[in-house]
Image (cartoon, coloured by chain):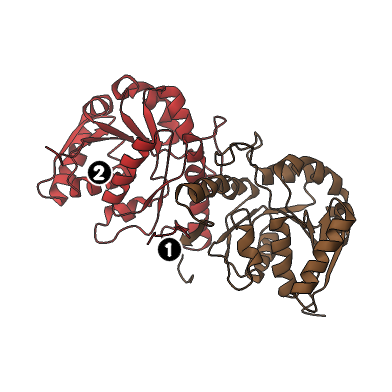
Chain colours: A red, B brown
Amino acid sequence: MADRKPGIAVIGGSGDLGSGLALRWARAGYPVIIGSRTEEKAVAAAENIRERIPGAEASGMENSAAAAAGEIVVMTVPFSNHRPTLEAVRDAVQGKIFVDVTVPLVPPKVSRVQMPPEGSAGKLAQEILGPEVQVVSAFQNVAADHLADLEHDPDCDVLVAGNAVAAREQVIELVEACGMKGWHVGPIDNAAVAEALTSVLIFMNKRYKSPGAGIRITNIPGAD
Amino acid sequence: MADRKPGIAVIGGSGDLGSGLALRWARAGYPVIIGSRTEEKAVAAAENIRERIPGAEASGMENSAAAAAGEIVVMTVPFSNHRPTLEAVRDAVQGKIFVDVTVPLVPPKVSRVQMPPEGSAGKLAQEILGPEVQVVSAFQNVAADHLADLEHDPDCDVLVAGNAVAAREQVIELVEACGMKGWHVGPIDNAAVAEALTSVLIFMNKRYKSPGAGIRITNIPGAD
């Protein structure tokens, strides 16, 4: 039992980013529960994971049921669905680690930073979910198709923000399970950096014709 | 005359970051005008540059006079002096490129992102200075003592934001003159990323005992 891995629910897990994360966690041996707005899409996404990863433990449920079933809950939804989805899963995630991957993009100008008045989507999530939920912000800067390509690990570090240090630590394990380097970057207020950075990377992908620009942290003693 | 370099005024140039930038630009052959709140401190800082860089063209003036004398004006002041300094130099910088290096840190919690209601210091500068000034935001993430150490180039890329592409291009030349890589990151709204990132790097310096964490952009075709 010592190395039993916690079940991870991925709300919005039939989307590109959510399914890429779930795929990599399934490969690393985590049970994954795909959540989607319809059970049908969730089940299909879970089936796709089991096809790619023989022996993977992957199931599909409607979002609220998935949030209830997961020990750790990860949310990857468009910003327009951020608040309603948080309200829908609020009761189910009390006492849990909740990983908010939301980027507050405001179409059509998605390459322009337009942060919400609360400061960041992560901070807003902490406010909506309440103090008993350990909200951690991460994974905003990873290109979805890089996650889906299991032959290569994404060339991008992951900034991990949240008020609870132990929760950040656990999310850093999830980052490493995806084949990336995760960094403690401070309280949930600091989620603003990775969220805003996504607009900058979208701008750079166009400006420099990149298939998916990323960042690396430099000058940390003892790091790779 | 073709390769005559524009004179760069550095407002707040007797501080650590401003003097480090001025030192590197002087080394690269730019005439530099150090601005400070007192002419005396400015003259002393300019003298220090001429001592370290034989043949450097460096003078010192009170901030407003320096802003009038510079063809390009760079401002490195604490956030508490941001608005009054902008108002003091507004007339002198009309029609010029104005590089805002300000990080909106709010002591004592400088490792927590606390952005101004306008979104960023850079955006606020553009609002205060008006549309005839080409505000460019850059250099927030470079450790001052890395600039002062002329034996090594800082291991940190520079994110360059601003509404005028040609002005960004010119600032990228100034970044390269400092021995770093500069990137176009979009309109002045996108200054929020580098500004907020400074709090994250301060957090990481403490958390990971780094002498000055930085970032690199990855996955750009044709880049180093």
Given the image, what chain letter belongs to the residue carrying mark 2? Answer: A
Residue with the mark numbered 1: B219
- Residue A150 x/y as whole percent: 24, 57
Q: Residue furthest left?
A: A55
Few, some or many residues within 10 Å of mark 1 (<14, 14–19, 20+)? some
In the rendered image, the vertical position of residue B47 relative to residue B79, given as above or below? below
In the rendered image, the vertical position of residue A132 relative to residue B138, given as above or below? above
In the rendered image, the vertical position of residue B126 relative to residue B172, given as above or below? above
Task: State the SS at label 2.
Answer: helix
Calculate the distance from the C-alpha at mark 1 to the C-alpha at mark 2.
Answer: 23 Å
Residue A151 seen = yes
Residue with the mark numbered 2: A22
Q: Please, what is the three-letter code of the amino acid marked with disc 2?
A: Ala
**Who's the residue at 43% across and 23% down the image?**
A128
- Of A100 and A18, nearer the camera is A100
- Is A142 on the left-hand or right-hand side of B184? left
Few, some or many residues within 10 Å of mark 2 (<14, 14–19, 20+)? many
Residue A224 appears in which quarter of the rendering? bottom left
- Residue A196 x/y as whole percent: 52, 44
**Who's the residue at 69% across and 57% down the image?**
B17
- Of A3 and A57, nearer the camera is A3
- Is B115 on the left-hand or right-hand side of A171? right
Given the image, what chain letter belongs to the residue carrying mark 1? Answer: B
- Is A112 on the left-hand or right-hand side of A194? right
Q: How many marks?
A: 2
